[in-house]
Image: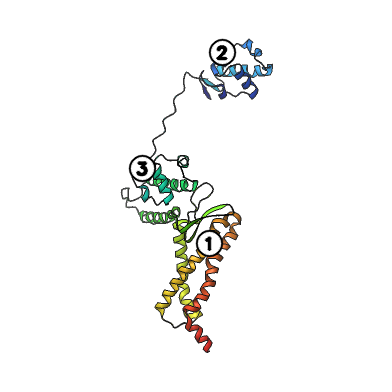
């Protein structure tokens, strides 16, 4: 049922384009004007043929009979949208945003998250020097704050004493760790354009990674860096005693060897990271997923393994000496 008033435009009516254009040229613009037009005058309208007149008369009869239409004196006003949820008064400097994002927010007069309660992606993109990447990063943080404000966690709700609360706390901790992906963490952060892709080149750390919709995805930021370092660190903790005791059979000073191994680990990872950040930014757009995953494995594991092999010859010299003596 389509509700109409006499003041509604004829654009709301199911008219053919030919009839609509004829009515507009005859200055018939509203439903009331169409219903009041004399039936014997329709053929006098320019380009209005018999078929078009029949279409208009049939529609007018249906409106009067209430066949799919209902004439009303006025339409109710749509309800006012609810005011946006007010965000907490957290200074923008403490939201975990990039320096560029903070500067853009301060330039628009936003000092706290509460000042951004009604912000949208479109309103942020209208700010001077605000790029899509920066705007998407801000919206990601604001959406997280809105979810927290609308659905408070256990620390804001009354304790229920249910056994599921510890599991909820663990899940929340994991979610908080994952959310670190929206924080830029890298040095020196040199802007680079390669194959049409713009990204920040880092020796240490990773820039935040976004999809085409401007949403943060796994594969960059502080969260990816921490996960990467944990995985590599565990691998080297396992690898060190294997290299020392079985590969090189070294009897050297354990403390010194650990120190040199850690130093080598840091330097090698900076080298690998400087290559990997280019691969992560560019390769995913041009190669299939399985090629991307293989390449990531080779870069993270293969290159470091080759470099480490020659470095280990220096860190564990006694084994080499014993082999020559034998």
Q: What is the number of the mark on residue 114? A: 3
- Marks 1 and 2: in contact by CB < 8 Å? no
Q: Quadrant of residue 61?
A: top right
Distance between mark 1 and mark 3 Cα atoms: 38 Å
Q: What is the number of the mark on residue 64? A: none
**Which residue sits at x=41%, y=47%?**
103
Distance between mark 2 and mark 1 Cα atoms: 74 Å
Other-residue count near label 2 (Cα within 10 Å), few / some / many at <14 / 14–19 / ≥20 = few
- Sequence-first tag of 1 and 3: 3
State the count of labels: 3
Distance between mark 2 and mark 3 Cα atoms: 54 Å
**Which residue sits at x=51%, y=83%?**
320
Dot 3 falls on a residue whose secondary structure is: helix
Q: Position of residue 298 (x, y in %)?
A: 56, 66
Other-residue count near label 1 (Cα within 10 Å), few / some / many at <14 / 14–19 / ≥20 = many
Q: Position of residue 295 (x, y in %)?
A: 57, 63
Residue 200 position (above or below residue 62): below
Say which of marks 2 and 1 sits in front.
1
Say which of marks 2 and 3 sits in front.
3
Tell me if I can see residue 141 in this picture: no
Q: What is the number of the mark on residue 36? A: 2
**Which residue sits at x=36%, y=56%?**
166
Q: Nearer the viewer, residue 314 or 178?
A: 314
Q: Quadrant of residue 284?
A: bottom right
What residue is disc 1 on?
Answer: 276
Q: Position of residue 292 (x, y in %)?
A: 58, 59
């Amino acid at each position: 049922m389509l509700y109409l008033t006499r003041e509604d435009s004829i654009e709301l009516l199911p008219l053919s384009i030919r009839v609509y254009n004829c009515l507009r040229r005859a200055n018939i613009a509203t439903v009331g004007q169409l219903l009041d037009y004399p039936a014997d005058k329709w053929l006098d309208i320019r380009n209005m043929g018999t078929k078009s007149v029949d279409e208009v008369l049939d529609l007018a009869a249906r409106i009067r009979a209430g066949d799919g239409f209902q004439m009303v004196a006025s339409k109710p006003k749509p309800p006012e949208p609810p005011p946006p949820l007010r965000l907490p008064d957290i200074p923008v400097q403490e939201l975990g945003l990039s320096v560029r994002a903070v500067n853009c927010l301060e330039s628009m007069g936003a000092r706290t998250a509460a000042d951004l309660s009604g912000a949208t992606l479109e309103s942020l993109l209208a700010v001077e020097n605000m790029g899509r990447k920066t705007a998407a990063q801000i919206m990601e943080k604001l959406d997280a704050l809105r979810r927290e404000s609308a659905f408070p966690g256990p620390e804001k709700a009354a304790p229920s004493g249910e056994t599921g609360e510890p599991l909820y706390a663990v899940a929340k901790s994991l979610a908080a760790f994952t959310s670190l992906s929206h924080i830029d963490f890298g040095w020196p952060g040199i802007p680079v354009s390669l194959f049409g892709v713009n990204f920040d080149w880092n020796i240490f750390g990773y820039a935040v990674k976004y999809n085409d919709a401007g949403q943060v995805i796994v594969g960059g930021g502080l969260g990816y860096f921490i996960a990467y370092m944990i995985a590599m660190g565990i691998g080297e903790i396992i690898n060190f005693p294997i290299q020392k005791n079985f590969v090189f059979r070294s009897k050297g000073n354990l403390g010194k060897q650990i120190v040199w191994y850690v130093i080598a680990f840091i330097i090698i990872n900076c080298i690998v990271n400087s290559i990997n950040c280019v691969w992560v930014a560019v390769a995913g757009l041009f190669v299939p997923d399985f090629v991307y995953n293989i390449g990531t494995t080779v870069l993270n594991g293969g290159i470091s393994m080759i470099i480490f092999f020659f470095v280990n010859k220096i860190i564990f010299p006694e084994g080499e000496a014993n082999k020559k003596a034998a």
